[in-house]
């Protein structure tokens, strides 16, 4: 009788210990699992913060000015002038941005109040002026948006000739129509830089 009682007691102890072991094991697994989840969440948070910092830096670089904003004393506009260039009045209603190392590379800018201005006539005069630069060459319309200034309703024409290139553009601001021409050289092309400055043009 004592033998069976002893066996019963032993069996009960074994079951109890097994149950405790299972519970402890399950709790340990849950704790490990919980730790893994927290680690993943922390990693995701860190990556998100790093991504936000990178986006902020990219935005700051994108918004960085080309140079000092210069206002014309001849027409109602201003633009950001890159280092190595100068803005000067050429004649009434005409300004020129030129490359200091070679003033043969320049951009002429004209502004016209929208009211009373015929845009179609401005475009036609632009094409005629480009053509007059080299009678033997052909004026081509610029179809690629990347070769036009990032301005409202931009339209452009260009003509290549020996050792040079002439480009012309017409676009609009809130109250003006702007016409610009770039005279460039194939040896030291500056059209890209002139366009970057032209994209910053604002009228009053």
Image: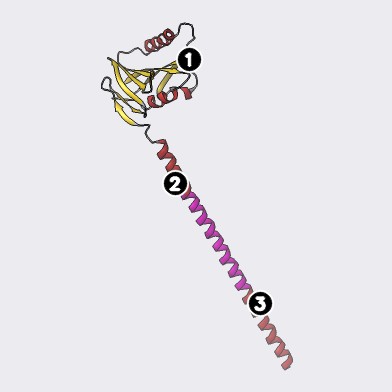
State the CA–CA distance, disc 3 to disc 1.
93 Å
Q: Is residue 75 magenta?
A: no
Callout 3 secondary element: helix
* Residue underneath mark 3: 18
- The answer to whether residue 139 is visible is yes
Q: Which residues are magenta?
A: 22-49
Number of numbered labels in the structure image: 3
Residue 194 falls in image quadrant:
top left
Classify residue 192 by image quadrant: top left
Tell me residue 104's x, y (percent): 39, 17
Residue 63 appears left or right of 113: right
Residue at image location 35% in from the left, 12% down from the top: 118
Picture colour scheme: secondary structure
Left or right? Give the position of 190 relative to 22: left
The quarter in which the C terminus is drawn is top left
Residue placed at 47% from the left, 22% from the top?
147
User: Badge 1 is on which residue?
Assistant: 163
Q: Quadrant of the N terminus?
A: bottom right
Q: How far is mark 1 from mark 2, CA to CA?
A: 46 Å
Nearer the observer: mark 3 or 1; the answer is: 1
Mark 1 element type: loop
* Magenta span: chief secondary structure: helix
In the structure shown, which secondary structural element does the residue marked by tag 2 occupy?
helix
Q: Is residue 31 above or below residue 149?
A: below
- 9 to the left or right of 102: right
Identify the residue position indicated by label 2 in the image: 53
101 or 49: which is nearer to us? 101
Mark nearer the N terminus (3 vs 2): 3
Q: Nearer the viewer, mark 3 or mark 2?
A: 2
User: Mark 3 near mark 1, Cβ–Cβ under 8 Å?
Assistant: no
């Amino acid at each position: 009788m004592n033998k069976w009682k002893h066996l019963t007691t032993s069996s009960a102890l074994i079951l109890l210990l097994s149950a405790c072991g299972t519970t402890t094991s399950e709790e340990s697994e849950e704790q490990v699992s919980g730790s893994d989840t927290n680690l993943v969440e922390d990693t995701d948070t860190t990556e998100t913060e790093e991504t936000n910092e990178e986006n902020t830096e990219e935005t700051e670089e994108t918004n960085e000015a080309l140079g000092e904003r210069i206002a014309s004393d001849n027409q109602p506009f201003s633009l950001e002038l890159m280092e190595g260039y100068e803005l000067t009045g050429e004649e009434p209603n005409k300004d020129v941005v030129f490359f200091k190392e070679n003033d043969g590379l320049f951009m002429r800018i004209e502004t016209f109040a929208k009211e009373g201005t015929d845009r179609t006539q401005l475009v036609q005069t632009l094409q005629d002026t480009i053509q007059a630069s080299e009678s033997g060459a052909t004026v081509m319309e610029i179809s690629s948006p990347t070769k036009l200034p990032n301005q409202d309703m931009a339209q452009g024409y260009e003509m290549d000739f020996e050792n040079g290139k002439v480009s012309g553009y017409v676009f609009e601001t809130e109250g003006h129509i702007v016409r610009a021409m770039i005279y460039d050289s194939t040896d030291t092309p500056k059209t890209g830089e002139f366009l970057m400055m032209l994209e910053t043009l604002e009228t009053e």
